[in-house]
Image (cartoon, rainbow, N blue to C red):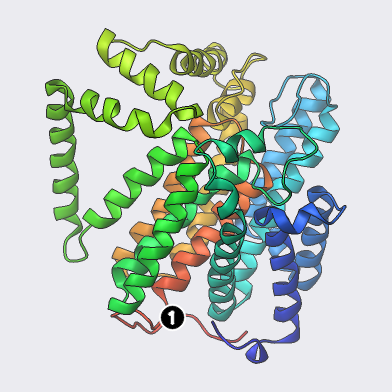
Amino acid sequence: MMAASSLSLRQKIFLAFTFLYILFNAIPLFTAYLPITVQIICIVTVIACGLLYPRSLICKPMKWFYIFLMVLIAYAVSGNYFHINGLNNNTMPASSRIIIEAAWIMPSIMIADVLSEHGSMKLLKIVGWGSLILLVLSFIYILPVISMSANMLRELAMSDAPDVPKGLPDYTLMHSYPLMLPGLCLAFRKGNLRNSIFFAATIVLFSFVIMRTAVTTSIGISMAFIFFALLVSKESLNKTVFLLCLCIVLFYVAYESGLVLAFIEWVMPYFEGTAVMEKLIDIRNSINSGSVTGGTLEVRGDLHDLSKQSFYDNPLFGGDKVGRHSQVLDILGSMGIIGFLPFIMIFISVLKLYITEINDRFDRVFLYSCFGIALVYLYSKGIFGATGWLFTYVMAPCLVVAVANSNFSKRVRPTSRMYNQ
């Protein structure tokens, strides 16, 4: 991490507001003792970024965000239904939902633009490594709690009991942890022996916490990505594609021969009493019956189908019935292509901000992976909020960029960026 003394005053103030935003959204122990809402911190962060770096208000991702905002306002004024995931769309006024959605998305977009366009590589590295250090410290705090039970973290996160320990991650934050794995796995692949051992231990720590969240989607994503990160080849990405295809074939053979079913039966006792157990039972029953069956899988499919049907009925403007279990499908279902196009273009535009910070093709694969994991969540889940956008647009890509441009690795490349503004 670069010395703070080499930064300008404006950069130091920007970092202060950035880490304040990270602390309020990613470190629950920090917010547990401060009576300030996340929405207020979001608004303060937007104002600070706008005053320090006015051009961040008119960057390309923000222009797409303004279009998305205008779509929301147009739907509200016309009385048409639009869906904001994570909010009560039936009772909350349209104006309040629009303000909250803006407060969730804007800070992360503006921080990402400042870091990539108006800041320096020093800032990117400080945010990337600093985010990782803060998360590890928060894990150390919750380890005694999550070591007690495989389902303890999820049960406490969903509980309203007054005696719940403070500083535990909420349901949205638990879903965000796998987004940091691409940066960690890249560091493991690129580092020397000593650094690789350190990052391997950090990956194990993240994996343990993710397993203890009992979030099936997060566990599946993490296992699949770690396997991919070990498989991907520096020398030949084409070879990696071949190996991935081979793995798909081998999985099909294992599925047909009953090995997948046997593996599920083998791991089920580990998740006894957790929310994962119910889904493993559904998967087992679905394999045995030859079609999707069981509670959780069937219900999720029905909810997704509801949003899909609403979109099929009116692809351009959407309808008024959504399943509330997929951010992507719910936007398509309630606002059609009119709402989905600017939404996805924000996502793509932020990705492009970071692509220019990495010269190596191999390293870029891990940057794409951050946004790929986020897409899986956006499709399969109906929650994201400020925390999800912070991890997707700031913390996870900054860690990948920091690793790609740090000299602890085996290969050191000069960066094409100026170190000082």
The residue sitting at 55% across, 13% down in the picture is 306
Q: Residue at x 33, y 83 (%)?
A: 412
Residue 359 in view, yes or no: no
Q: Secondary structure at mark 1?
A: loop
Front residue of 136/334: it is: 136
Residue farthest to the bottom?
5
Please state which of residues 303 and 24 is positioned toward the viewer in this rendering: 24
Residue pictured at 14% horizontal, 54% vertical: 239
Q: Residue type at mark 1?
A: Ser
- Dot 1: few (<14), some (14–19), or many (≥20) neighbours within 10 Å? few
Residue 123 position in % (x across, y down):
59, 76
Q: Which residue is label 1 attached to?
A: 416
Closest to the observer: 35 or 233? 35
Determine the image quadrant of residue 26.
bottom right
> Above or below — where is 253 with respect to 153?
above
Left/right of residue 26 with respect to residue 307 in the rendered view: right
Residue 171 appears in the rendering: yes
Instruction: Give the mark count.
Output: 1
Q: Residue drawn at (59%, 18%), measured in percent from left and top?
A: 323
The quadrant the C terminus occupies is bottom right
Q: Is residue 309 left or right of residue 65?
A: left
Residue 148 x/y as whole percent: 54, 44
- Point out residue 87 in the picture as x, y percentages from the top left corner: 74, 30
Q: Quadrant of residue 261?
A: top left
Q: Quadrant of the N terminus?
A: bottom right
Furthest-front residue in this view: 148
